[in-house]
Image (cartoon, grey):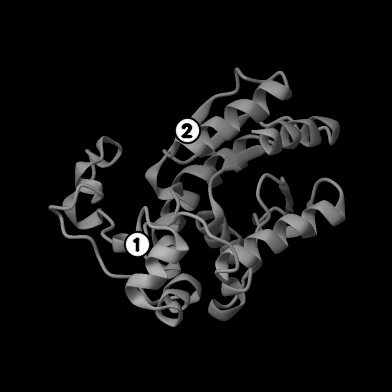
Amino acid sequence: MEEAVEAGRLMRDAGLRPSVVHESLLLRAIQTTQLALAEMEMAWVPVKRSWRLNERHYGDLQGLNKKQTADRYGEEQVKLWRRSYDVRPPELDPSDERHPSHDPRYATLPPELLPGAECLKDVVDRMLPYWYDSIVPDLLLHPCVLVSAHGNSLRALVKHLDGLGDQEVIELNIPTGVPRVYELDGDLRPASWRYLGDPHEVEKRAAAVRAQASGSKSSTT
């Protein structure tokens, strides 16, 4: 919550005033957006939501912390699932209550689109249609568009914008709660990008994400 408020302050102080917001259907992204916009005194800005910006679905690992997954599958296997580009964890059976078919946020999706488990490549594949069909049209209309999403869906977006290779994006660690600002050219390709805020704090948060991904600290998937 503190990071979200700080992000709003940083955007306000940088003179960024988004005309529209795109965010995921997950509560933490929604709350982050609300807190940041409130700090900017821009809570009235229209918000568009899509499951295509949701965090990666970890399948049978969903809801388990690092120790639980390591105890069940072994540390090396879990590391492979978390840090590979195209290796999915075990898929959830549709009868499992954690399966998206039981989540009202996915109720209107065709069954073949429901993610029983995802690798990063899957997240890229489902995020890109939303970029082209929804975010790009708004970028053509508005000078500033805000995207509020998650580690993996934002990595997918950065992969596309920066032209990162499959192995490069695996090593990308996006710090939590830090606005990443792109200046786009007429073809909507990055002319430049930067993080807002103190560089040392940005690196500290990126290092925390890196440590989490490597299993250096316990957390829930």
Query: Residue 41: x percent and y percent?
Result: 71, 18
| Quadrant in which the C terminus appears | bottom left
Residue 174's x, y, as percent? 65, 58
Label 2 CA crowd tier, 10 Å (few <14, some 14–19, many 20+): few
Q: Position of residue 104 (x, y in %)?
A: 25, 35
Q: Tell me which residue sits at (64%, 66%) in the image.
A: 210
Residue 183 seen by the camera = yes
Q: Is residue 41 left or right of residue 129?
A: right
Residue 193 appearing in the image? no
Q: Quick one: label 1, few (<14), some, or many (20+) residues within 10 Å?
A: many
Q: In which quarter of the image is residue 163?
A: bottom right
Task: Residue type at mark 1: give it.
Answer: Leu
Q: Distance between the residues labelled 2 and 1?
A: 29 Å
* Residue at 42% over, 57% down: 56
Element type at mark 1: helix
> Which image quarter: residue 215?
bottom right
As rendered, which of 48 and 190 lies closer to the eye? Answer: 48
Q: Which residue is drawn at 64% across and 68% down?
A: 172
Q: Tag on residue 26? A: none
The numbered dot on residue 48 is 2
Name the amino acid, label 2. Lys
Going by the image, does 215 lie left or right of 207? left
Q: Is residue 141 above or below residue 128?
A: above
Marks 2, 1: nearer the viewer? 1
Q: Residue 209: x percent and y percent? A: 63, 60
Residue 61, numbered label: 1
Give the structural element (helix, strand or loop) at label 2.
Answer: strand
Quarter of the image with the N terminus is: top right
As displayed, is residue 117 above or below residue 19?
A: below
